[in-house]
Amino acid sequence: MFDTNITLNQFVEAIGDTFYMVGMSLLLGTIIGTIFGILIVVTKPGGIIPFPIVYMILNPIINIIRSVPFIILIVALIPFTRSIVGTSIGNNAAIVPLIIFITPFIARLVENSLLEVGPGIIEAAESMGATPFQVIWHFILPEAFGSLILSLTTATISLVGASAMAGTVGAGGVGNIAIVYGYQRFDSFAMFSTVVILIIIVQVIQSTGNKLARMIRRN
Amino acid sequence: MIILEDIHKVYLRKKVETTALKGVSLQVDKGDIFGVIGYSGAGKSTLVRLVNYLERPTSGKVIVDGQLLSDRSAHELRQIKKDIGMIFQHFNLLESKTIYQNVAMPLILSKKGKKEIKERVTELLAFVGLSDKANSYPNELSGGQKQRVGIARALASNPKILLCDEATSALDPQTTQSILDLLKKVNNEYGITIMLITHEMSVIQKVCNKVAVMEEGEIIEQGSVLDVFGHPKHTTSKNFVQTVVRTEIPANIKRKLAEREVSTLAKLEMVGDHATEPVLQALINTFHLDVSVVFTNMTEIQDTTLAIWYLQIEGKESDKRAAWQFLEEQNVRYEEVTV
């Protein structure tokens, strides 16, 4: 019906690859990024556990990594990737730079979300004799939870976009089909359908995130 | 209960020094409801935060319940804070948690058992009259209800002291009254010492037994509420007192007095039972003085009455002297004022 070289199976496989890469890097990136984000907020001068050295090291590292375009990051990290996952091509090889790419991004988003929690809440916590850990766990994180979900939604969509470039190191994914078939082989159908699939994926992620955040914020 | 000794507090921001407190000393006794009043920027907020060490003094001593706070480790200070509840102008409740969870928070922080928490929270919600709101969220409550939750939360850990940071400033007059009644109840039933800061003299009038007036980082006047309301010494204190009690003669009456060339008046100040005793009658009948009432004001403070009379008194000097002696015996404060 369409003049195209790709099969339905390839699509299904590509969608699976995208989910795999995004899921894995999101999971690890969220864990590390959230920890970094919390560290930045609490160790800041005037924070609840002021520790200027930690802040002065973490803050520029995050900025430096965020300055490097993802496509450059993939290539620059090849030796590092090989030492970690044993290969420099394929889906697993793409996950390493994706994590390195998304972690500082998530750290910044988490930082912004946590800073939205008013100083009054923190003061109330301290007036109750809460330890710094309790302030974070019982006050800051629950109050910022809705905003954190929205931040992670943004990060997930960013990852879907970045994973399209994973083809550079021989990984699959929906974006790869768009580049390899759509762009390099002038296959309009492949290009068009992958774009539609990406739009749908992004829409679903965003509206799920919005719904979750609304549920948590209860309004 | 609370002793502040020669407290200085200097903030250093962007290499500019701002002095918030300049040698403040005060003492709050057990069972007091101690009010600190002042305009914004007077240093009240800093002052109240010294008591639970949310603010540390640059110099001077903070002694709470016999403990010098500067000697205490961070861990000990956290334990001391559990004996000091605090409520805030903007309530500072956790929006993401139910009323029950908010009130339970201090107990969760102290790692109390579920059963104990449930009993205590149920009791506290009943005390503040919000038993039916246990599963609501703060954004479903009115301002007054939120402050009740704040009070319940502050009481959860059985504190000895309750600090109120402009606790009624965001509330309408009617709600303010109900929160003040609740604070009185907290003071009476639990014997909790209360220190509150406010910029509304009516709050001091309704609940406090002692007051300190602050201006530009200093306490310019302090004493019992009746004393300060009866005869404020400092201009700022006078201005605050004037907002709830007219202790000065209104301008139009002053003009009339000037027309009649009256220059001296007797100012009588009576407190409690004396305020309702027939003093005037005695002046007229017993001492044969010619008394006319120029201006009078009666106010209820701390469940007693403060009465201020401005009288124009004519008569023989010897009768007057006898009358003044009589007033002194009656515990009526008397002074001659020039109009």
Image (cartoon, coloured by chain):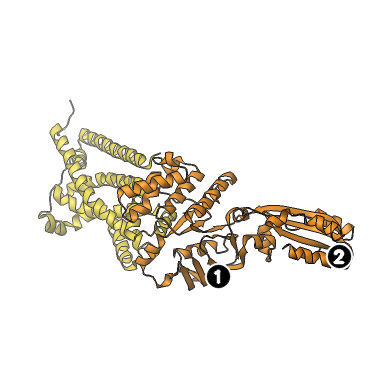
Chain colours: A yellow, B orange
N-terminal of the pair, mark 1 or mark 2, is 1
Residue closest to the far top: A1
Question: In the rendered view, does B339 fall on the left or right side of B186?
Answer: right
Q: Chain of mark 2?
A: B
Return the residue at label 2: B319
Q: Position of residue B87 (x, y in %)?
A: 47, 54
Hey, which quadrant is residue A174 in on the image? top left
Point 73% across, 60% down: residue: B269
Question: In the rendered view, does A121 fall on the left or right side of B188?
Answer: left
The local crowd at label 1, few if under 14, some if 14 to 19, many if 20 or more residues have their Cα within 10 Å, is some
Instruction: Name the amino acid type tagged 1.
Output: Val
Q: Position of residue B68 (x, y in %)?
A: 44, 71
The local crowd at label 2, few if under 14, some if 14 to 19, many if 20 or more residues have their Cα within 10 Å, is some
Point 10% across, 54% down: residue: A87
Q: Position of residue A149 (x, y in %)?
A: 32, 45
Point 17% across, 44% down: residue: A20
Disc marking residue B24: 1
Mark 1 vs mark 2: give the one in front.
2
Circle 1 SS class: strand
